Image (cartoon, rainbow, N blue to C red):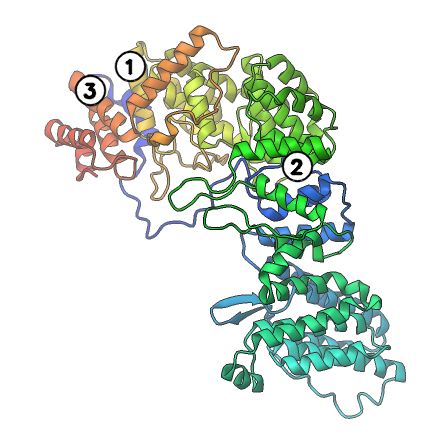
Amino acid sequence: MKNARTVLGLVGLAVLLPPVIADACGPEFEPDPRYQVSDNPDRPFDSFAAGRLGVIRRTYDLPYLAFAWRTMMGIPTTADEQKHLVSGWREAESRYGYGADAEWASQQWIAVRKEVMPSLEPRELMFMGEDGYARYSRIHGDAFLHAAATARTLAREWKQRPALLREWVGHQDGVFGDGCFLSEPEPGFVEALTPREQARRQAERDYQAAAMHLYCGRFDDAAQAFQAIADNAASPHRVLAAYLVVRTRVRQALFSPRGDEATVRTEKDDTPARLTQAEAAIQKVLADPKLREVHGPTRRLLSIVREHLSPETWRCELFSRVLEKGTGSALQAELGGLRMERDAEGNPVTCPGLKPRAAELSEWLQLMSIPPNGDDGTPMGPGPAKAFETAVARWKKTAHQPWLVLAMLAAPKDAPQVPALLADAAKVPVESPAGMTLAWRSVQLLRERGQLAEARALLDTIPLALVRDQASTDNLLREERLHLAKDWDEALRNAAQLVADEEQGPHQDWNSQAPETALMGLSPWRALYLESHVPTRRLREWTALPGLSPALRRQVSWAVFARAAVVGDDATLKAQAVALAESEPKARAELLAIVGRPTLEERLFDARLLIMGLPVVSARLQPGRDRLADTSPQLDLTEDLSWFRNGWCVPGMEYLQDPPGTPGPLPFSSPEERADAAAEWKALNAAGNSVAFFSRVALDWAKAHPEDPRSPIALFRAVRSSKRGCGQNTPEAKKAFSWLHKRYGKTEWARKTPYVY
């Protein structure tokens, strides 16, 4: 029998794992990371709003496709429009739900309030309201920002009148809280003010009273109060008040009223009449050139009203409206209202009578956006062939770049029109709005057509600075670099993917000599490709490249070690054990002990025994967010957790074969490397999930070495792995459990394993 002290030294790290960890309920998981954002541009949206469109995807939602169209057509977008676009898109795509921007604006108000009146205790804000089961922004973000600006102005004007400022702040607290009436001042308070101070105080009081009427659901009173302010040429709020008359009427039409109005509205649904009244107020504001400052937000409200009053007419009208210049905040709302209607057969419902440019936009959107599938899963609407043929014809006729973009995106690689399209695309500067899409698709088409040298040359001309803040586009270019690489170093530098749905800092050059600071990971398809086409020894080289993020490096480093142990790559196993011993001090002794074993059989068994006790480790390249993608030195490698990956699973059948169009082996890989990758891929899949693999390894070793003190330990770990591993109640685990209790029933390992899972 081997020296027991030496054996226990080898397995000491993993034995510390307790047999059961009780978790009362599952944790709150974040959504899986995306490496290609398919329905909207990359965050932050500022670049897209400014005209840097990156690679346009046919799966984008209509507002983004329509904005891309107008940008490629040279319609300028003002700074004011861009600001509202970014704000609206951030709100629409927010993971935190509607009202996120109002919440942000409220924090600006809180900060200014503390600055101008720190001694007055604040009241709770009520910026969200409820109508039935629906929640809505009771107080919009612009109200908080307007109050913050007014507070700073009044703090300067009333510097010598702190009591006056205190009264105003107290009233504003009531406006933003649950107050519905303004308090009256102490006798003599108003009389002590100068006429100018009295006038400004009254103007502010009138505005706050009108706002309280609105927030408390007294809509008629609010509309009358705001109109009185709008008619007062001396009021500093007259222009804004004219707009707020409109906002009041729209809210009155859409939300349940309170007080006396509630009785009237429940007896008869007069919503259409209310909406008509709101539209009349809107048209009154839009017809007044002196109110141009609020025309943009007023047009936004028009979108809401017309969508309810005449949805089909408004749907068609929007194709013209979104092409207008300088409409301020209206552009974001009108883009957001775009929609395509389809009949029962999936064909688009057209809008007769559109002006030529609007009709062209409508047709482009119909063909550019990928139509949904029917109930039986079959594609609806025009197929790819029609989109391609129409786009080519329109491009030849109009020379409008959106048609060239669609033609290139829809082009089959062997279409006879492709050479001419590639030549036309080459004339478009990559810095232009359509340029990045055309450059990327040109590289892809050239590669698919076997013109690798031309594809590489074009790829090298794309400035990396253009994609520093666009992870999806960066990932698409890295994909091409991976499959066009000339050697393993270049390929592996492009193997990892950037997380594309997080607002991160700029991404580094793929050839960077420093660790990537942005989040990185692997999609299921990328993990599949690397596992099936890259031999283990080359994956080990990947872990040494400097451009990998620290979290992904740790995850892949352990995966390489575990994979080498599973497929039997002795050279890589020893080399990776030495490397991990430097970066994983808690496992250093066990890793170096493996290297010191005299035979391949013992090295493989000890390595497998070690990973049996490390649920955090996987022999597969794990896609998405993984529990081992963690740089903390305190991470417990032995921890077995509910609701998390423990060991590894066999991917579903959909992930065991390359999707259509996936490139084959890397062009520079040698026949020997391709054979090794194929053999290891076969062995990895034959091993199955970790529970089955561990059970077979433990059982085989125990039968061949019944007196080895490691045998019951291995059986114990194999059975324990079935508690939360992939493959519970498996035949292999049952056999390991039976052998453990039959041959080693009096050992501590059998006592620690009363059940098989």
Tell which circle, 1 or 3, labels the residue nearer the N-terminal end: 1
Q: Which residue is mark 1?
A: 602
Q: Position of residue 735 (x, y in %)?
A: 15, 29
Q: Earlier in the sequence, mark 2 or mark 3?
A: 2
Quadrant in which the N terminus is drawn:
top left
Which residue carries the number 2 mark? 469
Callout 1: 10 Å neighbours few (<14), some, many (20+)? Answer: some
Q: Label 2: how many residues lie within 10 Å, few (<14), some (14-19) or many (20+)?
A: many
- Alpha carbon distance from label 2 to label 3: 52 Å
Q: Residue 616 location in percent, x, y?
A: 38, 33
- Secondary structure at badge 2 equals loop
Q: Is residue 743 left or right of residue 208?
A: left
Q: Nearer the viewer, residue 75 or 461?
A: 75
Question: Residue at 56% of width from left, 36% of height from top?
Answer: 519
Answer with left or right where residue 190 lies relative to residue 744: right
SS of the residue under disc 3: helix
Q: Secondary structure at mark 1?
A: helix
- Which residue corresponds to mark 3? 700
Residues at marks 2 and 1, CA–CA distance in whole angstroms: 49 Å
Which is in the foreground here, disc 2 or disc 3? 2
- Tag in front: 2 or 1: 2
Front-lying residue, 600 or 79: 79
Give the image quarter of residue 192: bottom right
Amino acid type assigned to the residue bearing label 1 in the image = Glu
Q: Nearer the viewer, mark 1 or mark 3?
A: 3
Q: Quadrant of the C terminus?
A: top left
